[in-house]
């Protein structure tokens, strides 16, 4: 039963992204469905995963796909809820990227009207969350 329960909770694959200058850009149209979208940016051989969710028009939540408590196992979506892979905590979408509890770690980003813009420097700073020791 354990193997089947873990299989049902696999993460969706991360979409690889590349930098355009000093930023990674994800078109807003790509995340307009209000669902969790997972991306990965390679930082010196380490895939740094981040998630984007459009909580409401004009309100995009950005965060690393890792938390301070449970580590880098990531998050999945079940219906309207974002769920921690490790402990099963349900995360309120409007709080994604804010501190506290099992919330995804904050990732600096902004929107420019057409894209979510994530600085490469911010992704590089999050590499430590995904390194294996």
Image: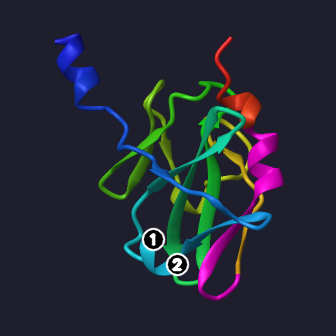
Residue drawn where x is 37% and y is 38% of the image: 11
Counting the numbered discs, the total is: 2
Taking the image as shown, residue 32 lies to the left or right of residue 22, namely left
| Percent x, y of residue 94 | 58, 63
Q: Is residue 19 above or below residue 68?
A: below
Helix, strand, or loop for circle 2?
A: helix
Residue drawn where x is 45% and y is 80% of the image: 29
Numbered mark located on residue 53 in the image: none
Judging depth in this view, the residue of 23 and 70 nearest the camera is: 23
Taking the image as shown, residue 36 lies to the left or right of residue 5, namely right
Residue occupied by mark 2:
28
Q: Quadrant of residue 21?
A: bottom right
Are the residues flagged by discs 1 and 2 in contact, CB closer than 8 Å?
yes
Q: Which residues are magenta?
A: 112-126
| Percent x, y of residue 52 | 54, 60
Residue occupied by mark 1:
31
Taking the image as shown, residue 55 lies to the left or right of residue 5, namely right
| Percent x, y of residue 50 | 59, 49
Residue drawn where x is 82% and y is 42% of the image: 125
């Amino acid at each position: 039963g354990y193997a089947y329960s873990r299989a049902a909770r696999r993460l969706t694959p991360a979409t690889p992204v590349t930098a355009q200058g000093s930023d990674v850009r994800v078109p807003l149209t790509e995340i307009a469905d209000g669902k969790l979208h997972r991306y990965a940016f390679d930082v010196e051989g380490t895939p740094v995963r981040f998630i984007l969710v459009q909580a409401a028009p004009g309100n995009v939540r950005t965060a690393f796909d890792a938390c301070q408590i449970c580590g880098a196992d990531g998050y999945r979506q079940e219906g309207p809820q974002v769920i921690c892979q490790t402990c099963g905590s349900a995360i309120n979408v409007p709080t994604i990227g804010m501190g506290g509890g099992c919330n995804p770690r904050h990732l600096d980003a902004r929107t420019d009207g057409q894209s979510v813009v994530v600085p490469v420097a911010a992704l590089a700073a999050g590499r430590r969350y995904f390194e294996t020791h």
